[in-house]
Amino acid sequence: MNRKLSVIVPAYKENQEIRSNIAALETELQNLGRLYEIVVVCESCPETLQAVNDLASDNIKVHYYEENMGKSYAIKYGAFQATGDLVTFMDADLSIDPREIDRFIKLMDTYDADIVIGSKRHPQSKVSYPLFRRLQSFLYQVLVTALFRVNVKDTQTGLKLFKREVLQKIIPRVLVKAYAFDLELLVVANLLGYDNVLEAPVEINERFNKVADPRSTWRVLRDTLAIFYRLKVLKYYDRDHMFIEMSGPELCVSIIVPVKKINDYVRESVRYLEEMSYDNYEAIIFSDEDTKPADFPENVRVVSTGDIGPAEKRDLSLEYATGDILAFLDDDAYPSKDWLINAVKHFHDDGIAAVCGPAVTPKTDSVLQRASGAVYESRLGSGSLIFRYTPRRPRETDDYPTVNLLVRTDIFSKVGGFDSSFWPGEDTKLCMDMINLDKKIIYDPDILVWHHRRKLFIPHLKQIANYALHRGYFAKKYPKTSRRPAYFLPSLFVIGLIGGPAAGMIGGGWFVIYAIVEGFYLLTLIAAASWATLMTGSLSIGLLVIPGVMATHLTYGAFFIKGLLIRRLVR
């Protein structure tokens, strides 16, 4: 049987030699006498893309994305593009001879192996590398064996061959994007019962003699321990319903953006839509009066709606959209390159009504905008909802904002769209209606968009006040998803801040308790500011986080109480 072979080649900052390397790889694949494709994944380096772009053909697929995500992410990305029955990975510099692929395929066929991996420790391997590297490799393998009981002698050599049906079960579970990707592949394979793994000899050229960067060694250890934590403590890899296989028909997506008028943020979003790795989409911008600018692409429409609210505009998608999925995006947000690829794969499970992902503050925002983002991205600022603002582990959720929410069109129609009497808050009602249909909403950190923030302080606090007012009202009207302790905590903080000194005057040790609580709160503010400084690299942003979090808590707490007390929510 002539099974098709996919060879994934991650490429980053490669010189012109990559052209001759790809040509040499194609020659070897032609000599195999089988169907093949080469999937070249260029990341964050236009020069590398330029070097290989004109090689693109029916057998050579070239992909590119802007973010520098690391080699392992590039391999995972390429796996979702691959169409072969067998899938393997090769470094762009061909440090391992591509003729080895033929031997790997023959071994897989002979022993019906699930996976064939290259091994530096195989008796027939030809590898020369320094004694210190040998010691490092030996100690790391001892650690791996102790932690994971993976029955292989070398997890890190780059060349690995997978049956597609095996890889498509493994790859969606893999999280490591940097330094222990190879190990995570084999750990997940072992967990899923794919234990027929063969180690094959390899010949590695002199490039391997380079001394490893000590920082890389530390990062490998860090990622290795993270894999152990997810495997043994979180049981993350056991959550079958969280992972959708990488195969399946491509669904049509309608991207819905409500705006007052076409602005610079909307133009930015359209540019990023054009760069996405998913082609089967249309974008519909619902604007008050604007017409479509001449420079917008064909698959972007602008519909003039008159002066109506965002919820009413989104509901118009049932009249204008043609997609299987409605992808709701705010006008001040723009998608990552693989936003739709990572989202659409979940909809091959009929039990999932919607998917969502983080809305991360762009580094290009101003200091005051990034300070607002840092407040949201801190545990102290957002509590358990921090996953909305920065990537966290996959999970089910029952409430998510429309800045980054994708919904099945038929489900959206079935629940009647948004309740336009609420804004903001219409997304909470929509999510609750979908949950009531016994459907799931899945959060995936790879379904990522970038979201420009409002400036600290006044614009930020106005937004917080709106959120809190509606959440307080919803806590009475829709307690299933809104009457949760975390939403009440800022209000308790406000009450304590006002009532604490008065209680202290009564005596009985109340003032001491008040002072201890406030002191602890101050320490947590300092910790949040320190973390923000570390994550953003800006002391100014870190210092702004202290008053920013305090003002956020006070504003949210006060307006949440107001929402609890009002009889009717005025839009």
Image (cartoon, rainbow, N blue to C red):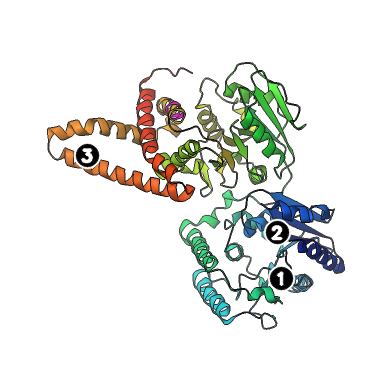
Q: In which quarter of the image is residue 348?
A: top right
Identified by mark 1, the residue type is: Ser
Badge 3: residue crowd in 10 Å (few <14, some 14–19, many ≥20): some
Q: Which callout, 3 or 2, points at the residue further toward the start of the chain? A: 2
Quarter in which the N terminus is drawn: bottom right
Mark 1 and mark 3 residues within 8 Å of each other at the beta carbon = no
Number of numbered labels in the structure image: 3
Identified by mark 2, the residue type is: Ala
Q: Which callout, 1 or 3, points at the residue further toward the start of the chain? A: 1
Residue annotated with mark 1: 95
Relative image position of residue 221 (x, y in whole percent): 50, 66
Relative image position of residue 381 (x, y in whole percent): 41, 40
Tell me the residue at 70%/59% (across/down): 10
Identified by mark 3, the residue type is: Tyr
As drawn, which residue projects farthest toward the left?
507
Q: What distance separates the C-alpha of mark 3 from that of mark 2?
A: 58 Å
Q: Can residue 325 be seen in this view?
A: no
Give left or right: position of 283 versus 219: right
The kind of secondary structure element at disc 3 is: helix
